[in-house]
Amino acid sequence: MKEYLYKYILGIADNSLILGQRLGELCGHGPSLEIDIACTNISLDLFGQSRSYYQYAATIKGGNTTEDDIAFLRKEREYLNLLLVEQPNRNFAHTMARQFLFDHFHLLLLKELEKSTDFTLSAIAKKSIKEVSYHARFSSDWIKRLGNGTAISHDKIQIAIDSLWTYTDELFHQTEADKTMVSEGIGVDVTKFKEIYLQKVSDIITEATLKTPETTWFQKGGKQGVHTEHLGYLLSDLQYMQRTYPNMEW
Amino acid sequence: MITTEQQIIDRELISILEQVADPEIPVLSIMEMGVVRSAILENKIVKVAITPTYSGCPAMDVIGDDIQKALLDAGYTSEIKLILAPAWTTDWITQKGRKALQDYGIAAPLDPIADKEALLDQKRIVRCTNCGSQNTKLVSQFGSTACKALFKCDDCQEPFDYFKCLK
């Protein structure tokens, strides 16, 4: 039971950590100053959220475990984030499409998690909803702008959505830990809002004069710790300081 | 974790806490920001509960240290606790705080969709802090800190910050 709760929290927290790291890569490299700042602001929100989850997870794990151990010292297979969030930035269209596809899921997830019987998870969710509403607005606006922009921006965002779509089915997969937490009233039954998500996302895609992909082949594995090759490279950056100078602190 | 729907602050501590400035917006005290949710003197120790404006707010550690220092200078030892519930809202910024923000050049938060409407060229209600014109537009929903958006005035052409509404 404790082990399931721990894994359940990581499943949510790791999405924020890994996506935060991806967006953080744009610090100083954004296509314009405003977007650079926006992406790193979103990154900061996500890191803040993952910190709250990891602090809680550390108390459940017990012993001398700290939030930093959980964030920095796990092996690749122990990260339980969705495949979607670890996908590389490639170009701005990819970065926004990834953000857009995740934000709407994230918001629906948090709105359910707010009702959790677990006080801490509910409090983190309530706090995060306010931030993620801004993220979803930002990424949705960019989908519309790029779709309605030039022929080139239109094509690029369509390609990005098409190539990331294969990772969207996993958002609604449930692990053993998920199912147990749902039955305890702690976790969120993600299957409940799959239709709402698809409707919301395809409405915006349509408004952006783009096409919702009709892919039927989907990738999965992140929730079980089986990742795409991209995560390893991301972690080598993320974990560099702690691996090189063990136990270093600010 | 403590849950405080309202603020509970011992009267004698108010003036001390009012002297602690927000590290990112130095014209505002942390009291005017509504960051301090409770401060109670118990067995000679002041127990302070603060709440972050945004989850990733990097100012929280500094705010905690500054509170401890201010209280120590006034002769109190203190314990700082970070609480997440209820979540901070811009409604907790006091009238005095809103005025200080405006004077500092940051437009005070209006309603939750003011910036969206500005982006989509609908109602323009955010007032330029430089010339007072409402002919302003949103440049970016994310500004110099997590709590601010970047605006530009189409009349005086000056950029300015808008404190995002969080409800």
Image: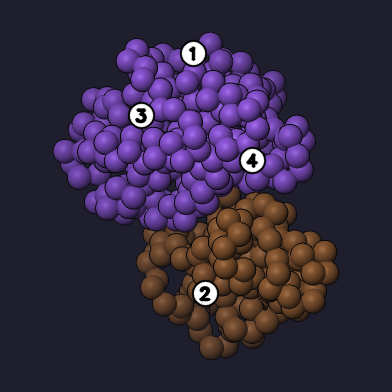
Chain colours: A purple, B brown
- Type of amino acid under label 1: Thr
Q: CA distance from mark 3 to mark 4?
A: 22 Å
Q: Name which of mark 3 and mark 4 comes first in the sequence.
A: 4
Q: Chain of mark 4?
A: A
- Type of amino acid under label 2: Trp
- Type of amino acid under label 4: Cys
Q: Residue at x 41, y 77 (%)?
A: B6
Q: Is residue A79 visible?
A: no
- Type of amino acid under label 3: Leu
Q: Secondary structure at mark 3?
A: helix
Q: Are marks 2 and 3 on the same chain?
A: no
Q: Residue at x 29, y 47 (%)?
A: A112
- Mark 1 or mark 3: which is in front? 3
Is A125 or B50 nearer to us in this picture? A125
Disc 3 target residue: A171
Q: Name which of mark 4 and mark 1 comes first in the sequence.
A: 4
Q: Is residue A233 visible?
A: yes
Q: Residue at x 24, y 51 (%)?
A: A117
Disc 4 target residue: A39
- Mark 2 or mark 3: which is in front? 3
Q: Quadrant of residue B135?
A: bottom right
Q: Residue furthest bottom?
A: B11
Q: Chain of mark 2?
A: B
Disc 2 target residue: B92
Disc 1 target residue: A228
Q: Residues within 10 Å of mark 2 (few under 14, many from 20)?
A: some
Q: Chain of mark 1?
A: A
Against A7, residue A32 (above or below) is below
